[in-house]
Image (tube, rainbow, N blue to C red):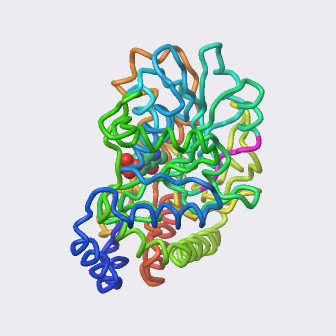
């Protein structure tokens, strides 16, 4: 059985007729740049999330870049972000001329640890970018408290977590900006690149709209320097088709996660983290000596939307061994992420002597299993069987 990490055709081909209708509508209209589907899509996303403003952009990366530019963050400023995330979170900070300051992540929720955020604040700190990694919210209560105390902007990177909630509110609606990606592997996957920025602040929204289009206002008059961060009309039209199914896709992801957790935890050496909140740096997270594998969990106050189902395999080299075994059996799985950002060559000049013990350990332990909505039960059974067999053989249990 061949089981890919993601199967975009399994999701898109059943929508072929609707997607082609959307394509035809845009083709006939001839309005390929900022056509009516862009505004309609923005309105639909804003309504779904319960925010007043949504601004369609060219990618999740450009959503972050546009947010930073709109907040006027630049040279001399420091922006705090987790060290275990997709590159673009920090890349954008550097691209506006500011300095990314990397913070350790929590071994239970994989998101930045509020106590480490506190230790990294200086007089130059301007903003925090919490990332809601793998589909689950960061500890927003603590982060918002810190931001308020130090008058910092908050940009939520929601690329992996559209539809996730924290205390019954959607992720992305707490900060000054929430930024989303429609890269095909995200929970709302487009047919190409795309993104959106949301905000509750009318002034920030109109500034962002202007910067999205070269800072042009009115046309050919530039009071500020922006970029071309526009979302294609065609992509917006296709995304409108898929947005209608997002709830259903999310429901299926949740079911798949529940199934993995239920079946895998029948082995006594496989457990979920015992942590109920992000621990201090000194804490360890190995529930007991017999634990071989730690399953991801939904934290208190969070509604997880499972962009990834990321397990931790303990013991030196064991993660790579299991990954090879799964790949040899035609099962797609991936390491998000094999190297922390503070360890990346491109940031070596800005990183000082920092301690990121949890993050570096996680980079050696994590493995994401297929969780996409269209994954079939017999496929999951096969993956579960292989993982359990490997554990039993390896540990003689
Ligand atoms: C995917 C992703 C991005 C970037 O989105 P693109 O649309 O690929 O540019 C940013 N941050 C995180 C956490 C992501 O997963």
Q: Position of residue 122 (x, y in %)?
A: 64, 15
181 w.r.t. 64: above or below: below
Tell me the quarter of the picture where residue 148 sits.
top right
Q: Position of residue 151 (x, y in %)?
A: 71, 26
255 w.r.t. 164: above or below: below
Residue nearest the observer in this picture, 32 or 283 = 32
Tell me the quarter of the picture where residue 383 sits.
bottom left
The residue drawn where x is 73% and y is 33% is 280
- Residue span colored magenta: 136-141
339 w.r.t. 247: above or below: above
Residue nearest the observer in this picture, 200 or 386 = 200
Number of numbered discs visible in the structure rendering: 0
Residue nearest the observer in this picture, 57 or 174 = 57
Q: Position of residue 225 (x, y in %)?
A: 37, 28
Quarter of the image for the N terminus: give it.
Answer: bottom left
Q: Position of residue 177 (x, y in %)?
A: 57, 43
Residue 90 seen? yes
The residue drawn where x is 37% and y is 55% is 194
Residue 336 seen? no
């Amino acid at each position: 059985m061949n089981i890919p990490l993601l199967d975009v055709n399994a999701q898109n081909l059943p929508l072929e007729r609707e997607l082609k209708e959307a394509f035809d509508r845009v083709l006939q209209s001839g309005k390929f740049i900022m056509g009516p589907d862009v505004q309609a899509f923005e309105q639909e996303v804003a309504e779904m999330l319960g925010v007043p403003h949504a601004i369609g952009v060219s990618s999740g990366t450009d959503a972050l870049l546009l947010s930073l530019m709109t907040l006027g963050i630049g040279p001399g400023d420091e922006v705090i972000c987790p060290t275990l995330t997709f590159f673009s979170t920090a890349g954008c900070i550097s691209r506006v001329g500011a300095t990314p300051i990397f913070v350790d992540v929590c071994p239970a929720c994989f998101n930045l640890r509020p106590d480490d955020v506190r230790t990294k604040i200086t007089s130059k700190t301007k903003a925090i970018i919490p990332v809601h990694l793998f589909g689950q919210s960061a500890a927003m209560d603590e982060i918002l408290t810190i931001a308020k105390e130090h008058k910092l902007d908050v940009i939520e990177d929601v690329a992996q977590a559209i539809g996730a909630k924290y205390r019954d509110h959607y992720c992305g609606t707490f900060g000054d900006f929430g930024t989303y990606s429609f890269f095909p592997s995200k929970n709302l996957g487009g047919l190409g690149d795309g993104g959106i920025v949301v905000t509750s602040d009318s002034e920030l929204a109109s500034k962002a709209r202007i910067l999205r289009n070269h800072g042009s206002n009115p046309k050919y008059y530039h009071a500020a320097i922006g970029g071309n961060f526009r979302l294609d009309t065609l992509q917006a039209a296709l995304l409108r088709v898929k947005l209608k199914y997002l709830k259903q896709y999310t429901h299926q992801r949740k079911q798949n996660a529940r199934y993995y957790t239920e079946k895998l935890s029948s082995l006594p050496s496989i457990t979920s983290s015992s942590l109920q909140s992000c621990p201090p740096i000194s804490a360890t997270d190995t529930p007991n000596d017999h634990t071989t594998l730690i399953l991801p969990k939904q934290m208190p106050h969070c509604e997880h939307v499972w962009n990834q189902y990321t397990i931790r395999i303990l013991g030196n080299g064991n993660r790579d061994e299991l990954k090879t075994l799964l790949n040899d059996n035609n099962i797609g799985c991936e390491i998000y992420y094999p190297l922390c950002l503070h360890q990346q060559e491109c940031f070596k000049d800005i990183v000082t002597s920092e301690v990121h013990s949890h993050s570096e350990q996680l980079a050696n332990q994590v493995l994401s299993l297929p969780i996409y909505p269209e994954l079939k039960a017999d496929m999951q059974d096969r993956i579960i069987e292989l993982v359990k067999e490997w554990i039993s053989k390896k540990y003689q249990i």
